[in-house]
Image: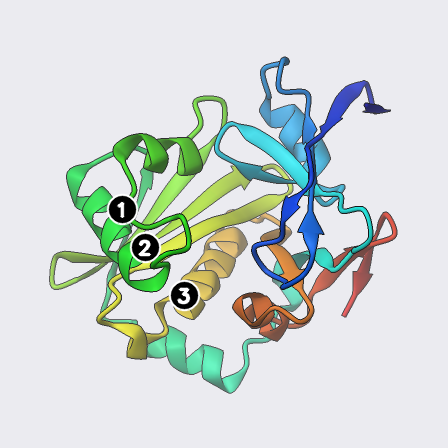
Amino acid sequence: MKHSSKIVLFQSAAEACSYLDNHSARNIYADPFRPPTMDMYNLLIQKGFRRSGHHIYRPHCDSCDKCVSVRIPVDTFKPTRSQKRSYLSNNDLSIHLSQARYTDEIFNLYTRYLNRRHQNAGMDNPTREDFERFLISDWCDTLFFELRLNGELICVAVTDELSTGLSAVYTFFDPDLTTRSLGTAAIVFQVELARQKRLPFVYLGYWIDGSQKMMYKAKFKPQQRYIADNWIGS
């Protein structure tokens, strides 16, 4: 148990890492017995933490430090040709911002995405409780970035709005529309939203060198990485 700015941190038990083979993983959590607040979240996200459901956490593994928190400085972001192409090819979509909530339509898209993209990974066949526990929290200012094609919901980017920026929590989309690169487009859309709101950063969560699942995060440049308690440009 540790203390940081009067916030008590608890360390989890070790378990198998879901990103790197032959690695164990553990996290530290902001005090689960103390109701989180946006002030707490704003402080901790600047220290490399992230939200999952009701909890604020950061990886804290025994013999590995490959999980690196990454954020995009909005004012200096320069999309690559591929990212520009993804953004422009999705200009035919309508965008609607809403407060995070459960609807059958959103949940059905989430279920289709997980069942196709995360089969046998412990995330497929989610329940409504799984959905709400992972993505929604009653203390957090969370938005659903809904993308529609001819009125049909095809993508949702779950985004936390903080005073220091937007935090990209999770994105799910129609698994039959992979050629649209909706995950990439959703990040660029979030950068544009942060710019409109005059927020300095978009937080992408953890980049993990050696994890194919997380390599896409390194492609958003310039970016800053939280290393040895400092944000360092990359």
Residue 136 visible in the snapshot = yes
Find residue 33 and report its horizontal and vertical position in percent.
63, 13
Q: In the displayed structure, would residue 6 be above or below residue 230?
A: above
Of mark 1 and mark 3, the one earlier in the sequence is 1
Circle 1: residue type: Asn
Of mark 3 and mark 2, the one earlier in the sequence is 2
Give left or right: position of 123 versus 52: left
Give left or right: position of 123 versus 231: left
Residue under pointer 3? 183
Quadrant in the rendering for residue 32: top right
Q: Nearer the viewer, residue 61 or 191?
A: 61
Callout 1 touching callout 3 (CB < 8 Å) = no
Circle 3: residue type: Gly
Q: Residue at x 32, y 55 (%)?
A: 114
Q: Residue at x 67, y 26 (%)?
A: 40
**Element type where label 3 sits in the image:** helix
Q: Name the mark nearer the viewer: 3 or 2.
A: 2
Callout 3 touching callout 2 (CB < 8 Å) = no
Find residue 172 and report its horizontal and vertical position in percent.
34, 56
**Element type where label 1 sits in the image:** loop
Q: In the displayed structure, would residue 58 be above or below residue 213?
A: above
Give left or right: position of 47 versus 179: right
**Element type where label 2 sits in the image:** helix
Callout 1 touching callout 2 (CB < 8 Å) = yes
Residue under pointer 2? 114
Quadrant in the rendering for residue 137: top left
Find residue 111 and report its horizontal and vertical position in percent.
25, 49
Circle 2: residue type: Leu
Give left or right: position of 209 versus 129: right
Q: CA distance from mark 3 to mark 2?
A: 14 Å
Q: Which label number is shown at residue 125? A: 1
